[in-house]
Amino acid sequence: MEPILIAIVILAVVILGLFAMFAKFYRKIEQGHALIVNTLRAEPEVTFTGRMVYPIIHKAELMDISVKTIEIDRSGNEGLICRDNIRADIKVKFFVRVNKTADDVLKVAQGIGCARASNHETLEELFSAKFSEALKTVGKSMEFVDLYQARDGFRDQIISQIGNDLSGYVLEDAAIDFLEQTPLSELDANNILDAQGIKKITELTAVEHVRTNELRRNEEMQIKKKNVETQEALLELERQQADATSRQHREIASVRAREEAETAKIQSEERTKSETARLLSEQTVSVQQENVQREKEVAENNRKRAVAIEEEKVTRARDLEIVDREKEVTLQRIEKDKAVEVQKKAIADVIRERIVVERTVAEQEEAIKELRVVAEAERTKKSVVIMAEGQADEKMVLDVKAAETQEKRARHKAAEELTLADAKLKVAERDAESKKREAEGVEAISAAPGLAAAKVQIATAQAKLVSFEAEARARKSWAWPKCTSAPPMPTPSSRPARPTRRSSRPARRPKPPACAPSSTPKPRARKSSALPK
């Protein structure tokens, strides 16, 4: 059991020793390098990855096989001469490296050495002459213009001229870094090739100068021609613009003139309308002021009439008290004379109708007069009419009421009631006449004094007529014989004709009936169809 363990331990130690030796003596190679190991054999071994290198028995050398650049610069009097003897300044870079094969690596190592194989100066010493010769050969086979224009072909011909025989090296690629014509100042006029090149350059440049000058002159001529055409076009456009501007100005002026005329017309119409509206407004205000003034005057007259009516009511109440007292005194006497008073009442009705007829005649005559003067007196004398009418109404009311009061004092109860009714009717008639005269205008100016006097006379005549009729009736009751029928009452168809002028005389009495040949009938005036409302 122990020998097995010992063997296992020894084997493990050996294995570990081998691993340690492998780790210590194994040499790895980086990319772009090659390892050359000299062994006990006749030929060294080349590896590009790595191998075991044992001390004493092996010698290892590292060679850089990466790509290196060699620049060939030929400029100035050493420039490249082309087939047309034009010298060109050129810079070309060549990319070379050691061929990655064991034979080429050993060839380079044996011919140059591993350390110098990648030295830049060594590479230039080795290949500068070869590469320059290839440039000269290829450049001499091409003219300068072709050389300048066909750089790819030039480069390919250089690589082809150099070939692959580079003593273990290989040409990867070439690049033309700079290529230009050599300036004339750098050329040697005594050199036949440079002289021919100068001649060629002079000919070409002269032709190009002439062509350039011709092109410049043509350019200037075309530019000048174009400028002239442009100037003519601009002038034509300016002329068209001026024409359009003038035409536009004329149209604008025409439109403006039309608009101004239309505006002036509209303004005139608006001023006319505003002036008309102002006049209408002033007229309306004037009419309203006149209406207000007239309403004030009417209100003042109404107030005066109301005062007069109140005074009349007071007077009437006083008269009524007197009448009441007289009524108490004469009550029994009235009972006795009741039949007589009924006849008196009929006579009073006749007298009242006659007075109405005469009043209507007077009013119509005054209306005729009013129609003649109302046109020119209506606007200027309304206030005077209203004041005169009020004064006339007041005076008329006072006079009429005074006459009625005297009449009432002389009458009995029936006459008193009738007179009161007549007084109310007359007050209503006076109110209606007042309103009518306010609307009609100047009627009362000339009619008021005569009408008031006529009514006073009528009232006086009425009082006298009542007394006369009472006496006549008393005589008639004794003088007429008794008839089977009452005396005929006048009818509207049998009423006398309407008088044409006012008269204070009583109407003609009708003939007595057949049953009373010698008696005097009671007078009755025709009722007017135009009674006051």
Image (spheres, rainbow, N blue to C red):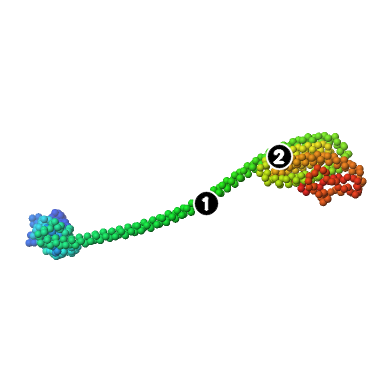
Q: CA distance from mark 1 to mark 2?
A: 53 Å
For image coordinates 48% across by 54% down, the residue present is 258
In the image, what residue type sits under mark 2? Ala
In the image, what residue type sits under mark 1? Lys
Q: Measuring from the top left, give residue 216's x and y in whole percent.
A: 24, 59
| Secondary element at tag 2 | helix
For image coordinates 80% across by 48% down, the residue present is 498
> Which residue has dot 2 on it?
388
Q: Residue furthest right?
A: 481
Q: Measuring from the top left, give residue 174's x and y in whole percent.
A: 16, 60
Q: Is residue 305 left or right of residue 170?
A: right
Does residue 152 appear anywhere in the picture?
A: no
Camera-nearest residue between 304 and 273 = 273
Q: Is residue 460 left or right of residue 234?
A: right
For image coordinates 75% across by 46% down, the residue present is 364
- Disc 2 crowd, CA 10 A, few/some/many (<14, 14-19, 20+): some
